[in-house]
Image: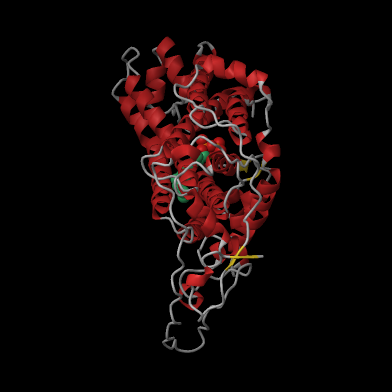
């Protein structure tokens, strides 16, 4: 273990901090000088010619570890709460959101002005960025009272009155390494393809926890019996536990978020939670409300498209966009540098593409895979892309959308109108448009294995069939 070069400035009252590399960065890649991004066509041709790293294989060890360690984060002294909090994590899943965050971390680490600082914090004891430090509470454990059998836990007993505990002497501050000058941007286009920092890995776990919390709540709202082919959490544990399990995950995610030591990231992720709620509310009310005014009118669905796409951003893309942006912040990108904007724009476009494909699959997979009629969303009263396009071609769809397909026979009629329209194909086309934009955005990053994997991931998101 090597000594931290800064240790001479540290008081003798505490043991000298130790530094160790958090991982082994790979050899620097050839810099590229992207000015104007190439067209989507040129990118696709380039993709076909270049070696194509499989995103899941590239990060498989990290993803496996991330999932294993995530279960430690959600342990509780109440076994029922642990069971429900773990439930969806134990099902096989695509881990799309953590993958996106880890890939963005790798594709941008080393580019931001404060990268050296972040790397130092990940390596030097006491700087707050080492993996084990992210598990340590910021407040005294007897104050925090956060019972988790998988984590250090010194909760004060409740069997007696609580006595004031004098605080320990504060640790002297560490001196961080000198900052790189913002103008010395010669490294700016060299991708290190360095492994994600511990803070970025923790962010990927936090984002997955928030996603799962939203699914727990969503399955209560939707009254879903199944998720990924198994009993849904409300079906297995009941609605009350599903809601409380989701709340518990949000609490744990928030505590972990604060330990990342980056208020911009806290702000970004907290705003994702509000976006998820806003998206769900918009889905429940607005599309139908908006449409109510249009009953009997010929197609005037422009506003409905706006609302639908806004809802799609809030419900799905916000977590990907702000999650990717947060990963880049944790890698040391400063305001005014393009990397954060690339992450947000990529995540926003790929997130919308992902949800549009989901909405297509709601029609397609029901018919092809399950032998059931597609359009489960119609049964929930939801008009997604295929129905909105079908409305353009069949004005009678407007009335069905307005009354949320509630009258007997509405769902079957709407399904038939979608089938007799080009709604499904046009929605997939729209997903391609968003994915192309996401691909184009990636061209602002220097070439690296991780960027290649993000390109492959983008293509898979739109081509997926389940
Ligand atoms: C799944 O969508 C659901 C979401 C993407 C978000 C749900 C958000 C909430 C319930 C708001 C509360 C949020 C938190 C963080 C507690 P879907 O129904 O289209 O997909 P599905 O078929 O997988 O259910
Ligand atoms: Mg649902």
State the image coordinates of residue 55 (x, y, percent, origin top left): 65, 35
Residue at image position (58%, 62%) is 81
Quadrant where the image shows the C terminus: top right
User: Residue reaching furthest left?
Assistant: 293
Residue at image position (46%, 75%) is 171
State the image coordinates of residue 384 (x, y, percent, origin top left): 46, 26
State the image coordinates of residue 438 (x, y, percent, origin top left): 50, 27
Please name whichever residue, 296 or 146, is drawn nearer the observer in this view of the structure.
146
Q: Can residue 149 be seen?
A: yes
Q: Quadrant of residue 43?
A: top right
Q: Is residue 275 above or below residue 401?
A: below
Q: In which quarter of the image is residue 36?
A: top left
Residue at image position (59%, 66%) is 76
Please name whichever residue, 325 or 249, is drawn nearer the observer in this view of the structure.
325
Q: Is 452 on the left-hand or right-hand side of 355?
A: right
Q: Give the number of marks.
A: 0
Q: Is 90 on the left-hand or right-hand side of 74?
A: right
State the image coordinates of residue 365 (x, y, percent, origin top left): 63, 25
Q: In this view, does 325 lie above or below 140?
A: above
Q: In which quarter of the image is residue 452?
A: top right
Q: Is 411 on the left-hand or right-hand side of 68?
A: left
Residue at image position (66%, 18%) is 49
Q: Can residue 373 be seen?
A: no
Q: Is residue 112 above or below residue 345?
A: below
Q: In this view, does 74 lie above or below 91?
A: below
Quadrant where the image shows the N terminus: bottom right
Please name whichever residue, 393 or 93, is drawn nearer the observer in this view of the structure.
93
């Amino acid at each position: 273990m090597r000594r931290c070069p800064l240790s001479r400035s540290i008081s003798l009252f505490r043991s000298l901090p130790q530094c160790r590399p958090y991982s082994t960065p790979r050899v620097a890649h050839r810099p590229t000088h992207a000015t104007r991004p190439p067209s989507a066509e040129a990118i696709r041709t380039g993709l076909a010619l270049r070696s194509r790293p499989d995103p899941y294989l590239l990060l498989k060890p990290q993803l496996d570890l991330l999932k294993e360690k995530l279960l430690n984060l959600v342990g509780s002294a109440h076994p029922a709460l642990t069971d429900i909090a773990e439930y969806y994590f134990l099902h096989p899943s695509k881990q799309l959101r953590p993958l996106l965050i880890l890939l963005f971390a790798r594709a941008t680490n080393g580019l931001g002005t404060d990268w050296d600082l972040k790397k130092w914090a990940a390596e030097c004891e006491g700087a707050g960025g080492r993996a084990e430090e992210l598990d340590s509470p910021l407040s005294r454990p007897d104050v925090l009272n956060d019972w988790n059998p998988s984590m250090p836990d010194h909760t004060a007993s409740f069997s007696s009155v609580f006595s004031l505990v004098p605080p320990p002497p504060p640790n002297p501050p560490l001196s961080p390494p000198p900052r790189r000058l913002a103008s010395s941007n010669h490294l700016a286009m060299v991708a290190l393809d360095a492994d994600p920092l511990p803070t970025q890995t923790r962010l990927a776990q936090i984002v997955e926890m928030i996603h799962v919390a939203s699914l727990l709540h969503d399955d209560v709202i939707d009254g879903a019996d199944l998720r990924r082919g198994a009993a849904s959490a409300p079906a297995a544990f009941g609605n009350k536990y599903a809601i409380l399990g989701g709340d518990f995950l949000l609490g744990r995610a928030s505590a972990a978020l604060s330990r990342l030591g980056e208020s911009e990231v806290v702000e970004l992720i907290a705003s994702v939670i509000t976006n998820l709620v806003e998206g769900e509310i918009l889905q429940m009310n607005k599309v139908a409300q908006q449409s109510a005014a249009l009953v009997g009118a010929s197609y005037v669905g422009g506003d409905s498209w706006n609302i639908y796409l806004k809802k799609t951003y809030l419900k799905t893309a916000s977590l990907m966009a702000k999650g990717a942006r947060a990963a880049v912040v944790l890698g040391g990108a400063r305001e005014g540098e393009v990397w954060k904007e690339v992450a947000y724009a990529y995540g926003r476009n790929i997130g919308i593409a992902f949800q549009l494909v989901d909405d297509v699959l709601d029609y397609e997979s029901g018919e092809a895979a399950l032998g059931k009629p597609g359009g489960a969303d119609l049964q929930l009263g939801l008009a997604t892309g295929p129905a909105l396009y079908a409305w353009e071609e069949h004005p009678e769809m407007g009335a069905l959308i307005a009354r949320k397909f509630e009258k007997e026979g509405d769902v079957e009629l709407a399904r038939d109108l979608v089938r007799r329209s080009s709604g499904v194909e046009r929605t997939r086309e729209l997903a391609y448009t968003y994915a192309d934009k996401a691909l184009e955005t990636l061209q602002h990053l220097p070439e690296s294995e991780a960027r290649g994997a993000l390109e492959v991931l983008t293509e898979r998101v739109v081509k997926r069939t389940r």
